[in-house]
Image (tube, helix red, strand yellow):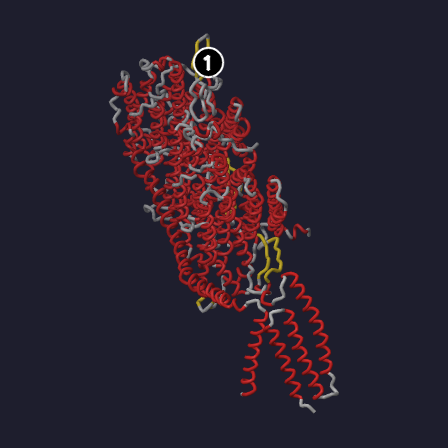
Amino acid sequence: MLFIDTHLLSLILFIPAVAAVVLWLLPNGSLRFFRWWALIASLIPLVLTVYLWMGFNPNAAGYQFEEQYVWYQAIGSSLHLGVDGLSLTMVLLTTLLTPLAILASFGVTDRVKAFMMLFLFLETGMLGVFLAMDLLLFFVFWEIGLVPMYFLINQWGSANRDYASMKFMIYTMGGSLGLLLGIQLLGVVFHTFDLATITTQWSTFQGSLLGLPIQTVKTIVFWAFVIAFAVKVPVWPFHTWLPDAHTEAPTGGSMLLAGVLLKLGAYGFLRLVLPFYPDEARIFAFALAALATAAIVFGALGSFAQTDFKRLVAYSSVNHMGFVVLGIAAAGLAPGTADARIAMNGAVLQMFNHGLSAAGMFFLVGVLYDRTHTRNLEDFGGLFPLVPIYGGILIFTSMASLGLPGLNGFVSEFLVVRGTYPLLTVYTAISMLGLLFTGAYILKGIMKVLHGPLNAHWSEGAHRLVEISKREILVAAPLMILMLVIGVWPAWILDIINKAVMQLF
Amino acid sequence: MTTETLIWLIPLPPILAFFLIILLTNRRKGLSHWVAIGAATLSWAAAMSVFVQAVGQHELAKEPFASFINWIPTADSWLKIGVLVDPLSAIALFFVAWTILAIFIYSVGYHNFGQPAGDHDVPGLPPHGATIEHGGHNHVVPSIEPMYSRFFAFISLFAFGMYTLVVSDNLLTLFVGWEIMGLCSYLLIGFWYAKPSARDAGVKAFMTTRVGDVFMLLGIAFVYSATGTLSYREIFQPQVLQTLAGVSTPILGLSAAGLIGLLLFIGTVGKSAQFPLHVWLPDAMEGPTPVSAMIHAATMVSAGVFMVIRIFPLLSLDPRTMTIVAFIGAFTALFAATIAVAQNDIKRVLAYSTISQLGYMIAALGAGAYVAATFHLVTHAFFKALLFLGSGSVIHGMEHGVLHTGKHIDAQDMFNMGGLRKKMPITFWTFLIGGFALSGFPLVTAGFWSKDEILASTFGGHMGVFITLAIAAFLTAFYTMRQITLTFLGEARTEAAAHAQENVWTMTAPLILLSIFAVGFGWVGIPEDFAGLRGVSSNWFHHFVGSMLGETHAIEFNWIPLLTSLTVAFGGLFVGWLAYRRTRTPAEDALQIPVLKKKWYIDEIYSALLIRPAYWIAETLVYQTMDKGLIDGLLHLFGKGTAAIGSGLRNVIDKPVINAFFGDGTAHVVQGTGRNMRAVQSGRIQQYMLVALLIMMVVAGLAYFLLIRL
Amino acid sequence: MIPISWYLILAAALFSIGLFGVLSRRNAIAILLGVELMLNAVNINLVSFWRYGGIADMSGQVFAIIVFAVAAAEVAVGLALVISVYRQRRTVLADDLDLLKW
């Protein structure tokens, strides 16, 4: 076996962090070098992930490419890494979006070295959550991801950044307190934090715990887990940190925040909540579905109400992630049925798709903001003739976000709707209202920015709007290609997701 | 190449053309239209080849051309997508291919290819004309559309959507094509996006149809979860239909089949602009005229009816659903016709007429007249495309006159026209053919045969529908003649109309082509025993399409519907001519009453009841009150609460007790002691020694007394 | 034979005179002289205890000799310090040398 085969996951996981440390040690010098260093350092994991994807056997059961190293032996925690179909998809998303976010941030001139370092650390943090097969490790990476993002918002954000970064940090950390307690509880009970071991034992665990009946404990811990992940996803009504954080973050930060960080929450549902608490998930499926539906409908309405373009896009995340949670609720309600599996397929694909489209949308908003220094929709208007290429890309990405058939969003939303309809008919029907308003806010964005009479402010003099640059097209292009490819031929990714879902649920 | 492979290839050229134009040739206008028309021609050729083979196939309905592939893995099974050409698809392919080709060619002329670039034209607005010098004079002539290439890209995508929809063998790819057309209609209606009216019309079209689409999506999810498949052929297996008809649902007491049918039908209500979702279609007239023809005739609105025809076996299982369908169709047919009589915009009249005619088809389907609806769908596609292109030609000719005279008047208002028959003879004659077909002018026009068949099918069993449709047919003939009279007959009402000019061949040739079909296509569906003329016609259409449902025998001939249809057609045409032959201004028009002008105030009602409340709910209720107020308020309250607890602890415990007492207190004591004691440290050695001596003596004394004496 | 107490009284008187000198004289050299007196008073004690204690044990004598040596060294260092202080501060009065004051 080659070294690369036996250590593939740790290479993917730690190369960005190592590159960040090396970057820190490098003397201050040319900004160009720092940018390229970060870009190349984040491209290596992408290449390795593609290699991983090639080597991954979707038919095999369980985790693959496992690696286990000694870590906290005394409390039964180890550095245990592994991938299955679910995490593989998310790893691909992360390693794909990070270089794009870095490339999108080439325009940053303020403290470039620190900025790039934070991105690389962030990548390691996010990848760690997806790759961890040990609960303590999971939690550590879960929290590590927050820190670089906090600084990215706090240091490079726009006007209201202090409030936003504080809200983001405290909300997410506060949410994950219960998660930490829950994880500790499991660790105390089983003397190990190993995911696979706990998964097999916990759901059938009987007896009493801490003097309480096990059912009560499980219910409490279930909700602790759910709230931690629900804040991150975010599920209504835990969503209000999101518009602030997304809006204030720098462009690259918003891309990763919407593209990957939100997926951590949904991934937590898939990886921990459903396998650990099948009974509770069934009992509370309707509550979860109600929250998801609320997220879909209120997210869309909230987005529709915005006058700030970036906030509009931020709210759309609430709307889209609602479908993920709706699919998860359906899967919790009737695990093992074909309907639930289809819903789950849709939910996982929706995570991936939302990663693409939300990152794309935030990027495009950022491109506009870089040039105009305003995000107020009323300040734009009729920009299409000035920036035809940008306009085309914006319409394309918007349509992917809207769920136009033929592009990626439709496939996943259709699968979710298809899977949840027989199980959660009423909720699915209500969520259609959200789908309707998805159209409304997307069209509102396009209408206010591109269409209508030209705002002369942007057409002449120093303010003249500059067309999207080649570098920026290079950021958008991979996203657009993937949107189209998944929309037309989703089987390549859905096959892996489907087989993983079949094994897990 | 097998026929199946060919069918797969039909939709491909337009989508390739779309990408080619967008990515490569968008700066070369001529090249762009060649790419688009070339692609349309390829698709047309493939479609015709398939059509001919389909017609030649024995028992096509039982053994259609079909092929499928696995598309999405769904748990243990795969969602399959594929192509299917049965008699219905074959017929649809025929009219779609012809109309699309005609519209593509027409667009070249309509967008002034070959004309100079405009003086002040900007992308996003219609061209305003260019000044050229000719023989010492400055002439203003039409200028080429600045976004010419983009237009061809969009209509290519549109064509792709329609072909996909037609050749699909399942509801999902049908929905894909359906939505892609929805996008294109949005882009094309809002083609001149810098005009606020066009921009808003595009959004309105998209949103209104989306209302229907989300219901349709639910319907698709329902049928998919109930049957495990989306393929028509599998859904329409007798035992599957049986099961669906047997399951009841809580909504309106409908069976599962009925509810699925209803949900899918709501999609059609949106797409085919049936009441109450018809409001987008008249506004869609903001788009360039070829777009109107695409949307109204050949493709998008037909798609809605096409889908209902497709799912007819499912829909017809539940009589209640059928009643709803028939009611909506008939109501729409009459409702839209009443509005059409009071419109002055040449295209808006046609728009309402389209709504009305689609209502006809829907009503026919609701009444169970499957073949008649299909027949009318096809003939309507031809003559309505003809009428729209004709009206475009009129407008274009008028615009020429407007530019020539330099007086800016509305080139679409029929009261600005008049006498155009002499100026634009080809347009006039073809428009006349289209208009007569629409009115159902007997025997020669296709519209007569299809409309007659609908009336004949509804007669007897569905008298309410029959009477409504007959009245609507009268109104149709009336407003058509009103339109023709105001536009072409009489004398020119304005200078612009007097200077109108016939258009280039790229515009007139499609008109002639379509007028041939507007007449000739009716002959394939003449009933066998029409008016006792047994043996004249084989009624090929009925046998071909009817074989889909095993219904090959035409309905019995009856004189009453025939006479009705003759009466309303002639009556309407005559009254229309009589009433408008001398009308010169809108004031003289007795039908300009506000309630009809304002389209029964439907837009106003929607605005008050739906749109403004939606804004209010989104902005005030959800965002300001709930998110900003309630949720963030709670969060801030929580934040402030913790901050209060924190500062409380600090002020009550930390500051006074820990800091002041323990921390600073200790320091103060030590410091004070030191300050007070420092005098001892005098620096004088003899003093120190003296002190040392004294202390030693004291210690020694103490030691002596304590240790030795005690 | 003269009883030992006479020697001890003499030594005590001498020590007290020396101590008085150390504590009361202002001149540093006089203080040093007082210290010498005190040392020698100790020597008298040592020698007398040797004479009246065990003669065989020589440690009394040895201590006295060591004290001589130390006293000599002390005087040398002490005088050197006094001279050094005088050079620095032009005074040898103990009261003026209060640099160690707070």
Instruction: Say what amino acid the circle numbered 1 marks.
Output: Ile
Q: Which residue is rendered at x = 75% and y = 87% of the image?
A: C56
Task: Note whether A504 is above or below B693 in the view shown.
Answer: above
Residue B535: in sight, yes or no?
no
- Which residue is at the front of the view, A380 or A301? A380
Residue under pointer 1:
B132
The percent coordinates of residue A402 (x first, y second) are: 45, 39
Q: Tell me the SS state at disc 1.
A: strand
In the image, taking residue A172 as reference, residue B364 lies left or right, namely left
In the image, taking residue B383 as reference, residue A64 lies left or right, namely right
The percent coordinates of residue A283 (x first, y second) are: 42, 58
- Which residue is at the front of the view, B24 or A498? B24
- Which residue is at the front of the view, B117 or A242? A242
Q: Which residue lies furthest to the top in this view?
A: B135
- Which residue is at the front of the view, A125 or A348? A125
Judge the density around disc 1: few (<14), some (14-19), many (≥20) Cα neighbours within 10 Å. Answer: some
Disc 1: host chain: B
Task: Note whether B705 is above or below B655 in the view shown.
Answer: below
Q: Residue furthest bottom?
A: C1
The percent coordinates of residue B30 (x first, y second) are: 52, 21
